[in-house]
Image (cartoon, helix red, strand yellow):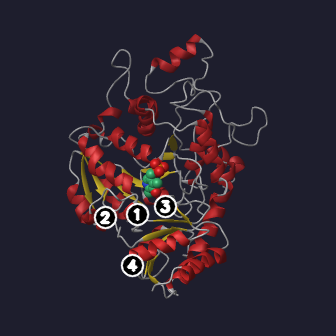
């Protein structure tokens, strides 16, 4: 079989970049600097991914000796004194003294979840959202205004495509949608109104692996952020884009991070690569002097490299409101504790089931990044760690109606649009997520009518194979 089991890289990347360089503008006594330094570097120790996934984000959870993250079901938080209100609001873009005021801005359950993903993604600061879609839209809007443009990958999640193809252009952002691995093209499309380049680490369902180093060299030179949706690389397990110069990492936490198909959520992590200074004119929101008297200081003056995340939380998100609920934050936080275990098993299952399917006489084709003949296999070997992801696509011999009969015959495998679930799922982009796209657009995204997506769960691989086999037995081709 033509798949390669794993790549030669150290198995888990240490959270080595999270030294003392964290943004530190929350000098409030109950909330220390956000980030992982406390937990990752306790007594000089560097912890591995699997350890961070259960210990990070708990730094402040010691009030009663609890060893887990409570749900802070509180819409608002009391000001200790009238002076703390004055301090909290004296600079409207971030509190000087009190981190928690109102849960649209910040909530301790969300903080725990944000810190945990920041730790796993080698980031500096995170902000959670109600969903992945909300995170993507809010970031795009926060960086741009009418008349600006962005260079966006043509191979992205269906909902994301619609945002960049229809919703954002109608609001005045011109989206230059292209194959972002065509680096010359990307370079040629960046002008002085370009506010970001957007792509996905592993795209869905084409499994295009972004050339992150190539792209970040271009965006660094142009002094604009490189934003990646890293949902399919599973919260840092299969790749850590921060290592390749990416500025902003976004996840739909609904998928691998939560891991159980229970809860929608999104998260944005800034890696600290952007200085937000060398191209001040392009991001005036971070550099305009503001404050009650109009001349106090700019966000950059106050927060330095943390200016963008301060803006995103305390200014943009504050009034747009796509925040994650505290219950959801806790659910996702618990999901992360088994992230590496789930991914390891799901990856194993992808290899076993993928090889079996590929050899099966009823299967027309199987596409998986782990197969040496996949067009993005080489890039996968460069940018992925711990394996090739847990999703593949396949087509069946016979008509599309026969294929649907087969899907209907599954007993174990669920026909549902979710991925990254602990349970194996099968989905059909053409008739669901990509139904609104034209045939040409679909083809650019790698979506065809005969394509089914298989997201491997953590079941025993023999049972997944047996489910396919019993369905093949029930649905004959003639
Ligand atoms: C699911 C998904 C989204 C949207 O996230 P929601 O949490 O469902 O809003 C965005 N990008 C990718 C790659 C996804 O798989």
Instruction: Choose the circle earlier in sequence order: 1 or 3.
Output: 3
Secondary structure of residue under mark 1: helix
Please tell me which of labels 4 and 3 falls first in the chain.
Answer: 3
Disc 1 versus disc 3: nearer the observer: 1
Residue ID at (41%, 73%): 401
Closer to viewer: mark 4 or mark 1: 4
Residue at (20, 50) in percent of width and height:
191
Q: Residues within 10 Å of mark 3 (few under 14, many from 20)?
A: many
Alpha carbon distance from label 4 to label 2? 20 Å
- Say which element carries label 4: loop
Q: Earlier in the sequence, mark 3 or mark 2?
A: 3
Q: CA distance from mark 3 to mark 2?
A: 19 Å
Task: Note whether residue 230 is visible.
Answer: no
Q: Which residue is mark 3?
A: 232
Q: Earlier in the sequence, mark 4 or mark 1?
A: 4
Disc 4 from disc 3: Cα separation = 30 Å
Give the residue number, with chain letter if any, for mark 2.
442
The secondary element bearing badge 2 is classed as helix
Q: Which residue is mark 1?
A: 429
Asked if disc 3 is less than 8 Å from ligand 1, the answer is yes
Q: Are marks 3 and 2 in contact (CB under 8 Å)?
A: no
Name the element at disc 3.
helix
Q: Are marks 4 and 2 in contact (CB under 8 Å)?
A: no
N-terminal-most mark, 2 or 1: 1
| Horizontal and vertical percent position of residue 418 | 51, 58
Depicted 27 relative to depicted 354: above or below:
above
Q: Residue at x 64, y 30 (%)?
A: 73
Whole-percent x, y for residue 46 in the image: 66, 55
Q: How far, Cα to Cα, is label 4 from label 1?
A: 17 Å
* Image coords of residue 369 (percent x, y): 46, 74
CB at mark 4 closer than 8 A to ligand 1? no
Identify the residue position indicated by label 4 in the image. Answer: 399
């Amino acid at each position: 079989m033509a798949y390669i089991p794993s790549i030669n890289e150290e198995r888990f990347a240490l959270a080595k970049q999270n030294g003392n360089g964290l943004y530190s503008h929350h000098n409030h006594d109950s909330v220390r600097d956000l980030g992982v330094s406390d937990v990752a570097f306790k007594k000089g120790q560097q912890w591995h991914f699997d350890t961070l996934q259960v210990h990070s984000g708990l730094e402040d959870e010691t009030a009663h000796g609890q060893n887990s993250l409570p749900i802070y079901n509180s819409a608002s938080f009391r000001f200790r004194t009238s002076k703390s209100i004055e301090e909290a609001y004296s600079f409207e873009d971030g509190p000087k003294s009190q981190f928690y005021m109102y849960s649209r801005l910040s909530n301790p359950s969300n903080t725990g979840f944000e810190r945990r993903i920041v730790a796993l993604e080698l980031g500096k600061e995170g902000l959670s959202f109600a969903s992945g879609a909300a995170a993507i839209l809010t970031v795009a809007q926060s960086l741009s205004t009418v008349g600006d443009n962005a260079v966006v990958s043509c191979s992205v999640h269906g909902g994301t495509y619609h945002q960049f193809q229809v919703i954002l252009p109608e609001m005045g952002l011109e989206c230059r949608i292209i194959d972002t691995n065509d680096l010359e093209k990307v370079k040629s499309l960046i002008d002085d109104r370009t506010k970001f380049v957007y792509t996905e680490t592993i795209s869905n369902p084409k499994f295009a692996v972004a050339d992150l180093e190539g792209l970040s060299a271009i965006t660094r030179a142009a002094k604009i952020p490189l934003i990646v949706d890293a949902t399919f690389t599973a919260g840092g397990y299969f790749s850590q884009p921060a290592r390749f110069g990416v500025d902003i990492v976004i996840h739909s936490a609904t998928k691998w991070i939560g891991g159980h198909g229970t809860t929608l959520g999104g998260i944005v992590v800034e890696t600290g690569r952007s200085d937000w200074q060398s191209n001040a004119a392009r991001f005036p929101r971070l550099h305009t002097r503001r404050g009650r008297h109009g001349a106090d200081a700019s966000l950059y003056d106050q927060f330095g490299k943390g200016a963008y995340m301060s803006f995103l939380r305390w200014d943009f998100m504050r009034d747009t409101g796509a925040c994650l609920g505290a219950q959801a934050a806790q659910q996702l936080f618990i999901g992360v504790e088994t992230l590496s275990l789930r991914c390891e098993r799901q990856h194993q299952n992808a290899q076993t089931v993928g090889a079996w399917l590929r050899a099966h006489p009823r299967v027309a084709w199987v596409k998986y990044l782990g197969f040496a003949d996949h067009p993005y296999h080489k890039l996968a070997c460069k940018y992925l760690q711990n394996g090739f992801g847990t999703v593949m696509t396949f087509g069946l011999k016979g008509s599309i109606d026969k294929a649907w009969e087969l899907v209907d015959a599954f007993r174990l495998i669920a026909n549902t649009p979710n991925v990254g679930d602990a349970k194996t799922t099968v989905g059909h982009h053409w008739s669901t997520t990509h139904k609104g796209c034209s045939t040409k657009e679909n083809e650019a995204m790698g979506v065809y009518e005969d394509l089914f997506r298989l997201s491997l769960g953590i079941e025993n691989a023999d049972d997944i194979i047996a489910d396919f086999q019993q369905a093949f037995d029930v649905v004959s081709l003639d």
